[in-house]
Structures are given as C-alpha cells and as structure tokens.
Amino acid sequence: MSDNKSNNTTETSLMSRIVSLCKRRGFIYPASEIYGGLNGFWDFGPLGTQLKNNLRDAWWKSMVECPPIGPDGKPLSIVGIDTSIIQHPKTWEASGHVGGFSDPMQTCRVCKKLFRADHIEDMLREAPWVIDLAETLVVSAYDLNVTVCTDKVINWLQRKGKKLAPGLAALKEQKPEFNKSITFLELLNALAYKTTPHSTLHTPHSLLPCPNCGGDLTEPRQFNLMFESRVGPVEDDSGKVYLRPETAQGIFLQYKNVLDTSRVKPPFGVAQVGKSFRNEVTPRNFVFRTREFEQMEMEFFVPPEDGMKWYEFWVQERLRWWEEQGVAKNKLYRHEIADEDRAFYSAATADIEYLYPFTDPNFGELEGVAYRTDYDLTQHQKFSGVNLEYIDQETKNRYIPHVIEPASGLTRGVLVLLCEGYRYDEQRASPEWLKIKPSLAPIKAGIFPLVNKDGMPEVAEKLYMDLRKSMICQFDAKQSIGKRYARMDEAGTPFCVTIDGDTLKDSTVTIRNRDTAQQERVSIDTVKEYLNVKCKM
Ligand code: ATP
C-alpha cells in the first residue's frame, strides 16, 4: 500500500491531517493566529510560499513565456501584465459586480450565523450535529419506510453512515422496497422533534436547517461580495472604491493599451496573476474558499466567429496542464455548465473540477473556462465612452473581440497539489509524505552527512555550497538519518543526498528517491547534473 492513501483514513480526518501537516511543516498557517485568527484568511509559510510561487511560475511559463501551440499549429501569442487591485469604481458597475456580484445568504434565527444558501446542503453533510445523528437518521429512515432521495444524500449516508450506522446496509439492500421518496430536508424535519435541541426545525418550509445548530434560517437575501474601501482623505462616498473580486477586469481595462503597445492582434491573450478579494459569506474548507486569495487568469481575445473553437481548445489545454502538474486524470472532471446556470452573457462555460477530500464523492471547482463573448469590452466601451474595437489592418474589419477566459485559483491550486500529493503509509519511517512533482517541490534536495563527524560534514557542506547556487536545497547534519529523510518526505522533497563512509574512499554518494524510498549510488561529481535534470521534471 506504499503509494496509496490509507483506507482506514476517513475523508474528514484525511483533510484534518493535511491541514495539520501544513501547519506543522510551514506550508499554511491561520492568519493573525496570535490574535485568535481571522475567518477566511490564511498565511503561507516558507514551504507553502515556495510551492505557491512554483505553481504560479509553471502557469506563467505555460501561458506567457512558452505559450501552447494553437489548433492551427502556430504558437499562441500571450503577454503578461500586472494591474492594480483598486480600479476606478465604474469598472465594477460596467462589469456588473456592483449590481450583481452577490450570493444569496441566509441567517440562522437561533445562533445568528450567516450561510451562503447554496452551501447549506453541503455544510449540513459535514455538520457535527448531523453526523451525530447519522445512526438515528438511517435507522429512522428505515423505520419510516422511506428512502432519502437525492444522490448527494445517499452518498453522504454511505460515506458517513457506514461506521456510525449499522442500519445502513439494510437501507441500501432494501431500497427497492421503500415506497416513498423524501428529501433530506423532509427526513430531518420528520425527525426534528426528537433529534435537535431546537423545536423550530419541524416548521414546514423549503429551507434547510442551520448547519451550525439546526435552527431555522431566514429566507435567502442577496449579499454583495466586494470589499469596500475609500481613497483619499475625505470620509464620504465620493472616494468609495472596491478591492477587486477578480483580476480579469484589470486586463479588460488595459486591453487597448496592450494592443497599441505590443505587437499582438487577435487571436492573442493577456495573462495576469494576483490577489483578489471576496467577502465570502461562508469561507471554509481550508484555503478552498477564502476571503483573500490569488488567481491566475488569462483573457484570450479572438475574432467573434472563432469563439467556440478557442473555447474548446482552452478547456482541453487547461485539463492537460493540470495533469502535467501531477494531478491524476481521474481526479479531474469537466463540468459543462448548463445554459440555465451560466452567466447570461456567456456562450459556454466549463468548470474544471477536482475530487477534493471534502467534496468526495463529488467534485469541486478548481478553474473556470468561460466563453464571455464580447460582454466585458462592450460594457467598458459603453461605460467609459472609449472605442474598444479592433481594426484589422488588412481587411479593415472592425469588431469587438470575443473572449475566452481560463480563470484559475492559485491558492486553490496549491490546495489541490497538497491533497493530491498527500500520502499515508505506515511502513515508512514517517508515514506522512507528500508526492509533489520535483519541479514544483519547494525544496529540491536534502544534503546529509550520514554522521556529524569523520570528515563527512565537510564533504556534505562543500556539495551543498555548490548546489545551492542553482536550486533550493537544505543541509542538515542533526538527528538520525531516518528522521532527516522523514522530514524531507513531509516537505515533499524529491531527493536526499547522503555522504557516508564510502564517499571518503571512492567519492560516491547515495541519492534517495522520495517516492520509492530507494537509494542509488552515484559519483559525487554527477550529483548536480542529476538533480538539475530530474528537478526540471
Ligand atoms: P464559486 O462558485 O466557487 O464561488 P466562482 O465560480 O465564482 O467560484 P470564479 O469567479 O470563476 O469562481 O473564479 C475563478 C477561480 O478563482 C475559481 O475557479 C477558484 O479557483 C478561484 N476562487 C474563486 N473564489 C475563491 C475563493 N473565495 N477562495 C479561493 N479561491 C477562489
């Protein structure tokens, strides 16, 4: 079972193990922790920052430095920019964020907590009070001679209920005999009078109960997600600005300058990486949904008639890219957004989803690829009064380009690498380790003298001094060699080089491979070349 996640690790504890490894090894810490933390904000530690930078650089390289070859065999033209977090407030009126960037939100009448309406069902499945009820729920469902009808709920019962509720087998086996189908909500309501401390739950309504306490929730109300701030010294609304909720709009605002100052013409792309801010109603699932996060977005401007062709190209390309970063194909899912669920201006949208431990057996969004038509440029043209048409110099055709947008979360991408890389193997000295692609790993190699004497530290240090010029490596002479390997495994370091007694005789060292825990002996002179080649992969 060397390469698999331990089967006895439940999904919940799998996630909490990942979170605690991140804290322990300096990948991700709660923000403002010494003041008790701030909900929805996280800080990246030394290893996490390096991992994030490496993922960002891989994206930048694949977009800007060495863009893909297009469907017609020609290399794409994509340039990079870096725009302000705070833009003219009209930007967000034009983009629709002031009027429409809101989530339906519900408040609990009992505990006063706020929830995003579309998150409540998922949250209920993870709510401790619901989990405590699993046995009652399943057994009672059986007693009531009903089956819980939504797939999500069945999945939940199968996952959470297995250990907690022996009655589940009966529920599953006898399902065809159940003659009535009710929803999870109805089941909860049916059981409410005996299962929750709050008698309010039984009121018949179409709303789910509070994930925190089981109390009644208000009807959904719209809540704008943009953080407001003020520029200048005047304390009135004239200086009101917003922290950007996405990086994309900065690209649209500079589209004309880019066209006029670079040698690009449609089809071409403009890429940007940077922070975005959303006052999320229910930040949760570690860094999956936070209030401050980083995005990697690229707007690809194309002649209108080519929109669908480029949309399909980018969906495929982005799926391929995530696989190239080490994400298993079967953990990625293309979710084509149905017409009725898409933004009105979008001609097609696909979410690239990942099988997170906290969404399993369902998938959750990692990246969105949206065919946004000419909506954004048309809106900015209208609101600014500036002509944003492109004039083809050869044909003299004028048009507002259509846009395909692959919009990815960098913060969320790091989470995917951590979830994907996390391994638990009791046979290893350190059961927990991270399988991260060498080119993305924060530390490339550990350089260890086997013992801290007999001339070994000097040789190891000389090698370290040479290697550190071209890659991040760590010299460590303390503790047993097994402990040092274990520390590197937890950090996701792909290689450890050990200088031992034989090194002093024949100038060879061992290189230990993180994934196999096997060692090979190579000449000390070849170590640099060996690591340089392997760590590019
Ligand atoms: P959701 O529906 O989950 O709120 P979205 O569809 O609004 O997300 P987009 O506006 O398409 O997200 O943003 C593009 C990407 O930015 C998302 O795929 C995700 O990776 C990332 N992202 C969006 N919101 C957050 C957040 N609150 N925390 C972390 N990453 C985020």
Image (cartoon, rainbow, N blue to C red):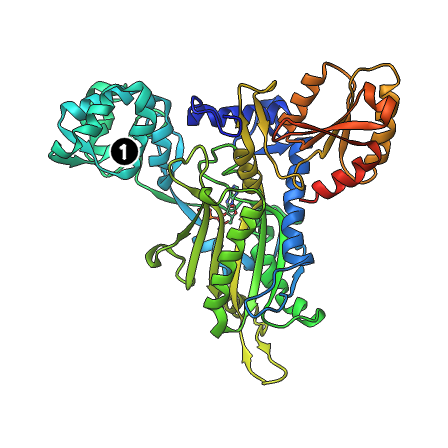
Instruction: Locate residue 503 relative to residue 11 in the image: left or right.
Output: right
Q: Is residue 39 above or below residue 362?
A: above
Residue at 80%, 38% in the rendered image: 528
Give the amino acid type for the residue marked by disc 1 in the picture. Answer: Ile
Image coords of residue 311 (percent x, y): 48, 63
Seen in the image, is 158 located left or right of residue 488? left
Task: Report x, y in % for residue 74.
Answer: 62, 69
- Residue on which disc 1 sits: 154
Rendered view: 415 above or below 433: below
Point out the residue furthest to the bottom here. Answer: 395
Q: Quadrant of residue 262?
A: bottom right
- At x 72%, y 17%, the residue is 481
Q: Position of residue 94 (x, y in %)?
A: 51, 62
Q: Identify the residue at image location x=82%, y=15%.
A: 452
Whether residue 38 is visible here, answered yes or no, is yes
Residue 485, quarter of picture: top right
Q: Quadrant of the C terminus?
A: top right
Residue 30 drawn at (x, y percent): 58, 28
Image height of 324 relative to 110, above or below: below
Number of numbered discs on residues: 1
**Closest to the observer: 278 or 218?**
278
Q: Secondary structure at mark 1?
A: helix
Relative placement, left or right, of 108 versus 476 is left
Apparent side of residue 305 relative to residue 524 in the rendered image (left or right): left
Return the residue found at the far front. 506
The answer as to whether callout 1 falls within 8 Å of ligand 1 is no
Q: Residues within 10 Å of mark 1 (few under 14, many from 20)?
A: some
User: Quick check: can you spot residue 468?
Assistant: no
